[in-house]
Image: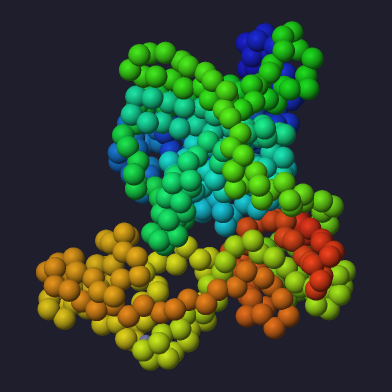
Amino acid sequence: MDRYTRLTELGWNMDLLRRGTVLVVGAGALGNEIIKNLALAGVGNVLVVDLDVIESHNLTRSVLFRASDVGRRKAEVAALAAADIEPRMNVRWFDAPFQTTLGLGALGNVDIVLGSLDNIQTRRDLNRACLLTNTPFIDGGLYFLDGDVRTFLPPFPVCFDCTLTQDERDTGWRRWSCLGILGDHGAGVGPTAPTVASMVGGLQAQLALKYLHKDFAGPYPMLVPNGVRIRFNGFADEYERWDLNRDSECPTHLSVTSVPLSPITSIPYGNDMPAAQLLEIAQAALGHEAYIELGFDVVHSLHCFQCDRIEAAARRRGALGIAETMCPECTPSVCFECGHSIAKTVATRPDLVFPEKVDCAACFESNPLVLRDSQTLNRIEPGSPALAYSLAELTVPMMDILEARDFEGQKTMYIQLDGDRDKVFGTC
Ligand SMILES: [Zn+2]
Ligand SMILES: [Zn+2]
Ligand SMILES: [Zn+2]
């Protein structure tokens, strides 16, 4: 008997599943359950993104992690464990923030995205990328004994951002920008039940398997409901399902409808190409004053008003921590009272926002901080400091689609970095 006999008896088509490509963002408790199910079902291509390291408390809720994995990267360990379940699976892992790793061209080439994240901002960024590329997004979430699955499929009558209040949108952004890190893992995350992770991750994987069959004439229709929330109430032991509503003020819907990404011009270069070379390509098509929109802010220099030194940098705004923003010349390196490292103190205080002083983590004495002013850019244009860097240094993700415009802003060209295709998808 063939390995997949029992699945084909269910009406599943193994060729479809083997050809399928699923992106899983988040390899925590929920991601583990999703990845395990995709491997068991024989899905051919799976991409796993997670920047976290395995800690011992993950071991009570993560089926793919073992005690000997503590300290290793979640994405890598989950991916290798999946390949151990189904060696024919082409599984790729990325141990970096989603936003600076997989670009729009990568999203546009996966069949479906499953979100298993613990923070709002990464979900919002993922949701936006899905809308821009017409890629279905099924989000999962856990809270205490409850679990939640939400479906957002093209043509996106409703999206993840529609389900948020303005306060939640603001909070998600504030955490992202002021903590100086991408993602707010750990912050505001309540306890979750590993048993509920199995239920929610199982449901997400099941919906993804159905979605891969959407054009398949099988023994029964495999339809995925669009724009619904399915909530497991862990106190009442009930599933509830209801339709989600479009928010007419949804910032993602309002901004995405105005920027259709077509037609796309593919170039055989990856994000390791120099920004100057990309500008030349845009100029050849759109004239000498063409420029490229990055779609995000990059800090290109740090200026200290006290000593007037300027340091060149290339960091995405929001990814720059207080420790890097401090002037190394003007801020004392150790506490004046006890000699404890100021950098170590600052690392324990991710809640600090533009502080002028900080209380020493060892002796609680107040120490002065001298923060530098960061100068940002959001375009690659003639004369720009961006021209000194590669696209990757400017935090442009692999296989991204960049928007080039002519000087008057009349003509637009969407350039996809196709040189990254093998790095993203491997042999699939
Ligand atoms: Zn929306
Ligand atoms: Zn200084
Ligand atoms: Zn001290």
50 with respect to 132 (left or right): left
Colour option used: rainbow
Question: Image quadrant of ligand 2?
Answer: bottom left
Q: In the rendering, at what x and y percent does residue 360 appear?
A: 18, 70
Question: Residue at coordinates 52% horizontally, 18% vertically from top-left?
Answer: 241
Q: Which image quarter: residue 349?
A: bottom left
Question: Residue at coordinates 45% horizontally, 60% vertically from top-left?
Answer: 177
Question: Residue at coordinates 14% horizontally, 68% vertically from top-left?
Answer: 364
Nearer to the camera, 162 or 2? 162
Q: In the rendering, at what x and y percent does residue 160 appear?
A: 56, 38
> Quick check: can you spot residue 23?
no
Residue 59 position (above or below residue 15): below
Q: In the rendering, at what x and y percent does residue 120 appear?
A: 47, 44
Residue 411 position (above or below residue 48): below
281 with respect to 214 (left or right): right
Q: Which image quarter: residue 243?
A: top right
Q: In the rendering, at what x and y percent does residue 118 appear?
A: 43, 41
Query: What is the count of numbered marks?
Result: 0
Question: Residue at coordinates 60% horizontally, 48% vertically from top-left?
Answer: 251
**On-image quarter of the C terminus:** top right
**On-image quarter of the N terminus:** top right
> Quick check: can you spot residue 321?
yes
Residue 198 position (above or below residue 314): above
Q: Which image quarter: residue 220?
A: top right
Nearer to the camera, 81 or 369? 369
